[in-house]
Amino acid sequence: MKSRREQRAAIIEILYTIDLLDHWELPESLETDFIRDMVSGILKNRDKIDALIVAQLERWSLKRLSYVDRAILRLATYELYDTETPHEIIINEALVQTRAFTDEGDNKAVSFNNSVLDKIRKSLNK
C-alpha cells in the first residue's frame, strides 16, 4: 500500500494530466479510495477551489502558474477546506511535493506556494 505522501503525488500527477488534456472527468481506474475521493472532490469543487486560489494570487493569474503548481495548490486547497487533516500537515505535504516536482533548488516555488496556501488557510479560518 502506498503512503499518503505517495498517494498525494499520484493525485498531483492525475490532476496535472486532467488539466493538460483539458478533460475534466474522473478517470475510471484509480488505485485507492483516498485517491478516488480526493480527485472526485477536487473535480466537483474546482470552481470554488480555483476561486480560493485566485483570491490569494497577487499579480498572477491561475493560468500563469505551471500545470504542476496548479495541481499542487488545488489538492492542498481542497484538503484545507474539506478534510480534517491539520492545516500544518497539508501545507507541509504541499511543500514537499513542490520541492519534488517544481522547485529548481532556489526555493522560489516553495516560497510562492507556501505564501498562497498560508493566505488560503487564514481566509478559511475567518
Image (tube, rainbow, N blue to C red):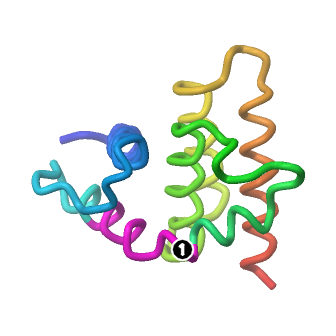
Say whether residue 10 is left or right of residue 103.
left
Structural crowding at the residue carrying mark 1, measured as other residues with C-alpha within 10 Å and reported as few (<14), some (14–19) or many (≥20): few
Foreground residue, 12 or 62? 62
Residue 15 x %, y %: 39, 48
Q: Which residues are magenta?
A: 37-48
Q: Confirm whether the magenta stretch covers residue 36.
A: no
Provide the secondary structure element on which disc 1 rests: helix
Q: Residue 89 sits in which quadrant?
A: bottom right
Name the main secondary structure of what is drawn in magenta.
helix
Amino acid residing under circle 1:
Asp
Left or right: where 43 falls relative to 113: left
Q: Is residue 42 magenta?
A: yes
Query: Residue at 28% across / 55% down in the picture?
Result: 35
**For residue 93, side relative to residue 105 (left or right):** left
Give the residue at the far left of this rendering. 29
The quadrant in which the N terminus is found is top left
| Residue displayed at 54% across by 73% down | 47
Q: Between residues 60 and 33, which one lies in front from this camera angle? A: 60
Q: Is residue 4 above or below residue 51?
A: above
Where residue 11 appears, as percent x and y from the top left, is 36, 47
On screen, residue 51 above or below 119: below
Classify residue 56 by image quadrant: bottom right
**What x and y, as percent, mark residue 52?**
68, 70
Number of numbered markers: 1
* Location of mark 1 (residue): 47
- Looking at the image, the residue that sits furthest to the top is 105
The image quarter in which residue 27 lies = bottom left
- Say whether residue 83 is left or right of residue 48: left
